[in-house]
Image (cartoon, rainbow, N blue to C red):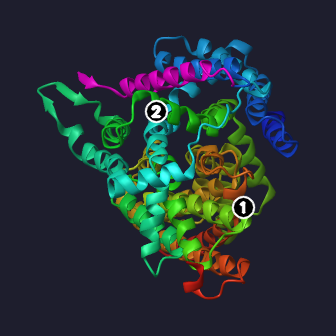
Amino acid sequence: MIKLIGVAIIAAGFALRVNTLLVVLAAGLATGFAAGFSLDEIMVMIGKYFADNRAMTLPIVLMLPVVGLLERYGLKERAEVLIRRSKAATAGRVILLYTAVRQVSISLGVNIGGHASAVRPLVAPMAEAAARGRVGELSATSIVQIRAHAAAGENIGNFFGEDIFIAVGAILLMKGFFEAQGMNVSVWMMALWGIPTALIAFAAMWWRCRLLDQRIERAAPAVKNRGGAR
Amino acid sequence: MKLITVEACYAIAGLYLFVLAARIAGEREHPRRWGSALFWVLLGVSFIGAKVLAPNVIGYLVVVMVLIAASGQVACGPSLEVSREERLQDAERLKNRVFWPAVLIPSTAVLGTLILGELHVGDVWLVESKQVTLIALSLGGILALIAAMRTTGASVHVASREGSRLLQTLGWSLILPQMLAALGGIFAKAGVGEVVAGLVAQAVPTSLPWVAVVAYCGGMALFTMVMGNAFAAFAVITGGIGLPFIVKLHGGNPAIMASIGMLSGYCGTLLTPMAANFNLVPAMLLELDDKHAVIKAQVPLAVVIFVANVILMMTLVYRF
């Protein structure tokens, strides 16, 4: 039970809004000591896992200059111009379309998109522009909700499309786990049984996107007429 | 032999970080320029030196980075953003050409993934085939930067200024995913998972088939929330609850159990700040004041998908 001290530190630290990095470090040290490791052994673990997981940070670092540069030269502004030409565009539809593209492509093994290279420079600004085209100026709450849903769309598409493709980490990990237990479980079957959840996840996203559009409309009741918003 | 390894990509990222750090150090009006610059230099060192330095050295580097961040020394500089009017003018001048570099990122990533891994002369391979996705994506980022500089006519100076502007928007939260992964690793080594699986198995009457399903899916989601990572939860919870109860005791189908179980874990990922790369870093990237705004938007989705998963597993796992 004492080994769960790290979980308690995380919960308390997050609740008290202490610097998150410090909380995580403290939780790591406490858990390590509770399990009987020495300081140097814990430092070896932190160093090793930190280095092993550089892949989490790499795509963001490498995208920073190019995304920053394109933003400086009006990428968001241009995306807004394009989206305003489409009469059918709403924030929810833009986000849902992105979710669909992301989910289908990754289920075929094609990993495109991402928070740094697609959501920030393209999806979120386009969704915001679509909403502005409908209702005029947006409230601060609406902007937060549009952006948060754009990020959610990326996550939903990514998570619930990935497991349908047999050559990805999740399926191979499960295969490896069963092999270690002396069981032979087909990767095709595991991929197949991921499909119902994938469909439900997309349906849930559709529902949230519709709700998002309704909320945006409600938050801006003054402008009913679309033409007037332009 | 491999000509291009993923380490080369990390080295380039490290060099980017050095350039951005040098820029920040050179900003006289920056309130915390030395602390911020040092933080990014250390991250660059950890990127370049991970295979050369001893793991405990990296560990202590990480501790120094955490202390710099926790003492408030990593901060944003003076606003570097050019005015909206200026950006609109450039957008008007460039029209859709501004999209080309952005499209180059995913297209290089896709083509690179398909082609690069196959290229070899005898035993000499062009890239490390295990890491081909990451290498192709990095290549996409680098090519897109070159293309963007050509299209816009911007100098290296402008590119580094804009890069450091974005880097400082993210701040220290950029390394949070790696820190949490390290914590997850320590949890795994310390045997936290076994304790959790044991508690769940003791607390609920898993002798009932449907209770076993609820305990397994719930265990996956909960433990993923603790670890921030469904993969780490999978081995522990499947070994502790799924296999002994659903498969061995009640004769459930292991493929259905594993597949839907993993997806139940992903519902946990949607809900936890521990999965910082999916939930907190995007909130920073999108400049949301509420760091948990993305999680809040995902709560209804996670709940609906989780309930659906439990129902699906109950109906399917004992039938096929």
Q: Chain of mark 1?
A: B
- Kind of element beneath mark 2: helix
Q: What amino acid type is highlighted by mark number 1? A: Lys
> Circle 1 sits on which residue?
B296
Q: Residue B5 lies in magenta, yes or no?
A: yes
State whether residue B188 appears in this view: no
- Badge 2 and badge 1 both on one subunit: yes
Residue B172 location, quadrant: top right
- How many residues crowd around disc 2 within 10 Å: few (fewer than 14), some, or many (20 or more)? some
- How many residues crowd around disc 1 within 10 Å: few (fewer than 14), some, or many (20 or more)? some
The prevailing secondary structure element of the residues shown in magenta is: helix
Question: Residue at 11% across / 26% down in the picture?
Answer: B122
Q: Residue B214 lies in magenta, yes or no?
A: no
Question: Residue at 49% across / 70% down in the picture?
Answer: A94
Whole-angstrom CA distance, mark 2 to mark 1, is 36 Å
Answer left or right for A2 relative to B22: right
Is residue A204 placed above or below B83 in the rendered structure? below
The number of callouts visible is 2
Is residue B179 placed above or below B211 in the rendered structure? above
State the image coordinates of residue A125 (x, y, percent, origin top left): 53, 60
Instruction: Name the front one of labels 2 and 1.
Output: 2
Residue B267 location, quadrant: bottom right
> Circle 2 sits on which residue?
B158
Task: Specify the segment rendered in magenta.
Answer: B1-29
State the image coordinates of residue A66 (x, y, percent, origin top left): 43, 40
Q: The C terminus of chain A lies in which quarter of the figure?
A: bottom right
Viewer-closest of A66 and A162:
A66
State the image coordinates of residue B104 (x, y, percent, origin top left): 31, 48
Question: Residue at 63% across / 50% down in the picture?
Answer: B237
Viewer-closest of B131 and B26:
B26
Answer left or right for B193 relative to A133: right
Q: What amino acid type is highlighted by mark number 2? A: Val
